[in-house]
Image (tube, rainbow, N blue to C red):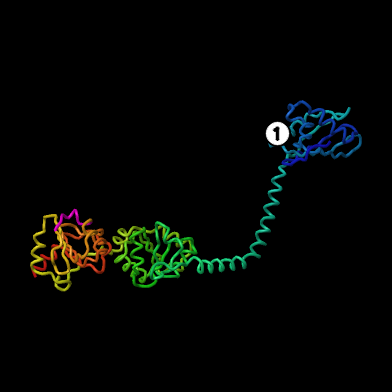
Amino acid sequence: MGGAPVTIKYLIKAEIEINGIVDKPDVIGAIFGQTEGLLGEDLDLRELQKSGRIGRIQVDLIEKGDKSHGEIIIPSGLDRAETALIAASLEVIEKVGPCDARVRIKTVEDVREEKRRKILERAKELLKKMSRETIPDSRKLADEVLSAVREQEIIKYGSEELPAGPEVDTADTVIIVEGRADVINLIKNGFKNVVGIGGTSIPKTIVDLSRRKHTIAFVDGDRGGELILRELLKVAEIDEVAIAPPGKEVEELTNKEVVKCLQNRVPVAEYLHKDSLQPVKQQKTSIEEKTFIPQNIITQIKKLENTLEAILYDADWNMMQKIAVSELPETIQKTSGIHALVFDGIITQRLLDLAEDKSIKLIIGAKLGNILRKPLNIQILTFTDLKEEDNK
């Protein structure tokens, strides 16, 4: 019987026994006739075959004496439940023509399972073939990619032309590493917001960059890396620290190691505490060794204690202004030619940064706050230092 093409999901296989000699069309007629109306119009075999949800019914018969027996096969594109109903309905067949008959379902096979098995086996074969054929090409491709990274993505950054990734200017966070090889490795592993110091001295570009952006210092896991980090912390505003595994260099880390190191980064304060690298403290060499302060100025400074006032001096120790400590930040920004700043307050990192921008050479305050980065060109003293000098 003709019909639409069937997408086969299941094969219903049944055995039939007939007490008499019959032909295949007799069996097919019995199947259609005796199941008609049993399961409603939606599961009527004739309609299902017309719509392509049931395939062509196949009957194979063998005559033995005065009896016939054989197999019925029905392809089904229905779902499992509907297929099971169709299969069960075959077992109600009791007659084929005038002869008694009995039908029993042997199996309902999931054709797709066999297809899936064949697909899996074929996929394994193809994968082995691909692996054999593409390994040399993939290595070559990796080399080409690395070469392209080195040639195209490394840029020269700042006046010192430091090696850097293409996103160092646009990213909010910048990773600072030691050299060009470190930059290449980080770019290769997907981190393009990276810049290299390019040597043991810290370039001004790095210092300026650290003031504008959130910075992560990523150094080698050896003594050299520790020394680089110490230099960085002296002059740059580093926010977080990442360190390669002990004995390893950043340039040789795998992708997994790079990611893990950056995930395990710690704030600078935590790193300093952990490694006993305390924030910068004032040095205890004598005041005369550092700079000359006239005696009358020292007397003026002592009178500032507990006044919450500040005095600005020029290079000749002439008083430029005397103001309230609360006005210091704004006044420093607006005033040029300041040589020394003396005030009854705490010396903070922010104040040091402002002073460095205005080229102030000497700061004397009541106390020293938590300073992580001491500008190399500024001398820092406290009122206590002056008192200790008097007692010598």
68 left or right of 82?
right
Considering the image in quadrants, where does the C terminus appear?
Answer: bottom left
Residue occupying the point 40% across, 68% down: 196
Q: Is residue 9 above or below residue 373?
A: above
Whether residue 220 is visible, yes or no, is no
Residue occupying the point 22% across, 63% down: 336
Residue occupying the point 31% across, 67% down: 230
153 left or right of 10?
left
How many numbered discs?
Answer: 1
Residue 323 quadrant: bottom left
Most common SS among magenta residues:
helix
Whether residue 164 is visible, yes or no, is yes
Residue 81: x and y, percent? 68, 34
Q: Is residue 319 above or below residue 49?
A: below
Residue 329: x and y, percent? 22, 56
Residue occupying the point 43% across, 59% down: 260
Magenta-drawn stretch contains 327: yes
Residue 308: x and y, percent? 14, 55
Residue 291 quadrant: bottom left
Name the foreground residue: 162 vs 223. 162
Q: Is residue 293 above or below residue 83?
A: below
SS for callout 1: helix
Residue 343: x and y, percent? 15, 59
Name the foreground residue: 233 vs 338. 338
Segment colored magenta = 322-329
Magenta-drawn stretch contains 29: no
Name the foreground residue: 128 vs 50. 50
User: Residue under circle 1?
Assistant: 82
Residue type beneath disc 1: Glu
